[in-house]
Image (cartoon, rainbow, N blue to C red):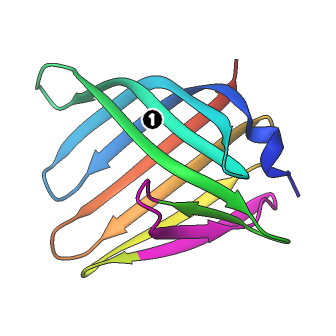
Amino acid sequence: MIPLAAFEGRWEVRRQIDDAHTNQHGRFEGQAVFSPRDGGMHYAETGRLHLGDAPPMQAERHYLWHSDAERIVVQFPDGRDFHSFTTTPAAQATHLCGEDLYEVRYDFAQWPIWTAIWKVSGPRKAYEMTSTYQQR
């Protein structure tokens, strides 16, 4: 298992987005920074989001990562739980948001390069998003 402390630092993020609901493709290029906070890590992501033919836009997201004995717990900035996972080579998690189901598969087999593949399905959403992280 990879300890939470190993994520600390700056990561390059490249993301592909395929939205079947809107029939759009997109990409994100930016960085994620994991910094110690309250016994865990604050995840801050910033970069440029390109969706379809629209002009690129600045995008950001924030999460709180904590670890217990066996899992990493990801929370929204307000402290609500998002999902949790192990850092085994192929970890999985789910999150239900209303009627939309978020399923993620983490791949740590090439650590310190790792990926997160999200498949989101439901009445309002249908997309796949693949993010690749490489430490800088």
Q: Is residue 110 visible?
A: no
Residue 125's place in the image compared with 39, above or below, is below
Residue 101 at what x, y percent from top left?
36, 75
Q: Secondary structure at mark 1?
A: strand
The stretch in magenta equals: 76-95
What residue occupies the far right of the structure in this picture? Answer: 1
Task: Determine which residue is flagged by label 1.
Answer: 15
Asked whether 135 or 75 is in front, the reply is 75
Residue 70 at what x, y percent from top left?
83, 71
Q: Indicate the quadrant where residue 121 lies.
A: bottom left
At 16% from the left and 49% from the top, the residue drawn is: 23
Residue 96 at what x, y percent from top left?
38, 78
Q: Is residue 83 left or right of residue 21?
A: right
Q: Is residue 81 visible?
A: yes
Magenta stretch: includes residue 87: yes
Dot 1 amino acid type: Arg
Q: Residues within 10 Å of mark 1 (few under 14, many from 20)?
A: some
Q: Is residue 29 left or right of residue 34?
A: left
At 41% from the left and 59% from the top, the residue drawn is: 78
What residue occupies the far bottom of the structure in this picture? Answer: 99
